[in-house]
Amino acid sequence: MGKLMIWICPECGSYARHDIDETGAICEKCKTPLVCTDVSAEEAKSFIDSHNLTQFDEWSENLKRRYVVDYEAKAAEEAKAHQYIPKCPTCGSPVIRPLTRNENLFDYAQKFGNPNWACKTFVCLNCGYAW
C-alpha cells in the first residue's frame, strides 16, 4: 500500500483520501474523476491538529483555488445562490419594490382609515399585491 494522499474533485471541490497509486477515484457527490493533490493525508491531519478552524478554512480555500476548475466563479455563483431574494407572497414574482411613506398614507386614506393598509411595506410590480 502506498502513501495516502488528499484527492480533490476538480468540479465541486470535495475532498477524499486515497492511496497515491490509485487510479479511477471518483467523486461521491458529482461522479467526476478525482485529482491527486501534493498534500499527504498525514500533512493534512497535522495541519488540522496544530491550527485553528479559521486557518484550516484558509488552507482549504487555497487548495481548492489550485485544483478546482473555475473555483472563483463557482464560489461567487454559490454565494449568489444562497442570497435571499424577497418574492411576492401571492404570485411569487421577485419584481417588487418598497412602498414609500407617502404611498402608505395615501393608501390608508383611500381605504377610509383601514389600519391594515397603513403598515404595508412592499408592492409587487407583477400583480399589484401590497404586503
Image (cartoon, helix red, strand yellow):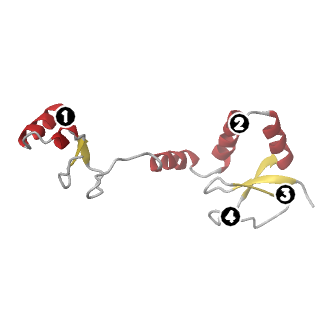
Q: Secondary structure at mark 1?
A: loop
Label whose residue precedes the other's in the sequence (4 or 1): 4
For the residues bearing labels 4 and 2, Cβ distance under 8 angstroms: no
Dot 1 alpha-carbon crowd within 10 angstroms: few under 14, some 14 to 19, many 20 or more: few
Q: Residue at x 61, y 55 (%)?
A: 12
Q: Is residue 68 above or below residue 62?
A: below
Residue shown at 26% from the left, 57% from the top = 90
> Residue tagged by mark 4?
28
Between residue 104 and residue 56, name the one nearer to us: 104
19 relative to 106 in the view: left or right: right
Mark 4 neighbour class, 10 Å CA radius: few under 14, some 14 to 19, many 20 or more: few
Marked residue nearer the N-terminal end (4 or 2): 4
Identify the amino acid type marked 2.
Answer: Leu
Look at 64% across and 55% down and name the residue there. 10
- Measured in 3D between alpha carbons, the distance from the residue under mark 4 to the one under mark 2, in whole angstroms, is 24 Å
N-terminal-most mark, 2 or 3: 3
Q: Is residue 85 above or below residue 1?
A: above
Does dot 4 land on a helix, a strand or a loop? loop
Residue corresponding to mark 3: 20
Q: Which residue is mark 2?
A: 53
Q: Residue 106's quadrant in the figure?
A: top left
Name the one closer to the observer, 74 or 53. Answer: 53
Which amino acid type is marked by label 1? Thr
